Amino acid sequence: MKTFKLVGLSVVHDDSDPQDIPFIDGLIINKEDGKNRWLVEAYLDQQYEPIFADLQHKEDEFRLQVTITNRSNDPANMLVTVRSITRMNNHISVLMEGSIVPSRTHLAEVVLAGLVKKGLQGEALLKEFKHQLDERRGIKTKNNEETVKG
């Protein structure tokens, strides 16, 4: 098994934008079981328990986007199920298991499609595209023009 630091976590509901889930700490583990199975554990504030309890109750796989090791990495898409939710004072630990699925569209394509749908074009499209791409990759922007790694 190989363990990696989890640095970004989002739940994808239907076709809407991913819901970022702030967390305190997290790991993602490649089980190396020949079935492409991964474990994701996130330690987060208890206010997020209803989201994961509902997903656990449905017992269906759901889409998760995880960023591994470095915020500048593109998020990986996963299909997971919630295995357990453990309460710890004012926090919870959520354990999920699933598979990384190949993305049919890359991050840039998703961002661009959303901006085109909003009707942006020309220089405004380019500026907002760069801003959103940097934001999703965890790169801080200064005055929306100059980018500085954070």
Image: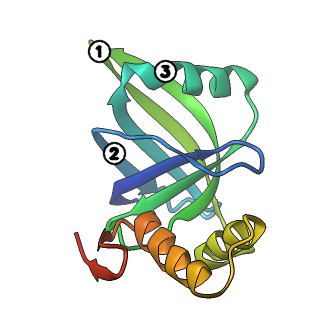
Along the line of sight, the residue nearer the viewer: 80 or 44: 44
Residue position for label 3: 49
Residue position for label 2: 26
Q: Count residues near mark 1 (Cα–Cα under 10 Å), then give few for <14, some for 14-19, many for 20+.
A: few
Q: Quadrant of the C terminus?
A: bottom left
Q: Quadrant of the N terminus?
A: bottom left
Quarter occupied by residue 88: top left
Report the residue at 40% width, 63% height from top: 68
| Residue 103 in view | no
Residue position for label 1: 90
Which is more N-terminal, label 1 or label 2?
2
At which x and y percent is residue 148? Answer: 24, 78
At which x and y percent is residue 145? Answer: 35, 81
At which x and y percent is residue 36? Answer: 61, 62
Instruction: Give left or right: position of 14 versus 27.
Output: right
Quarter occupied by residue 111: bottom right
Instruction: Give left or right: position of 56 versus 22.
Output: right
Report the residue at 70% width, 42% height from top: 13
Quarter occupied by residue 14: top right
Instruction: Give left or right: position of 110 versus 87.
Output: right
Q: Is 124 situated above or below 69?
A: below
Q: Secondary structure at mark 1?
A: loop
Measured Cα–Cα span from mark 3 to mark 1: 10 Å
Which is more N-terminal, label 3 or label 2?
2
Report the residue at 72% width, 41% height from top: 61
Measured Cα–Cα span from mark 2 to mark 3: 16 Å
| Residue 147 in view | yes
Q: Secondary structure at mark 2?
A: strand
Q: Amino acid at mark 2?
A: Gly
Q: Amino acid at mark 1?
A: Asn
Q: Mark 1 and mark 2 in contact (Cβ < 8 Å)?
A: no
Along the line of sight, the residue nearer the viewer: 1 or 144: 144
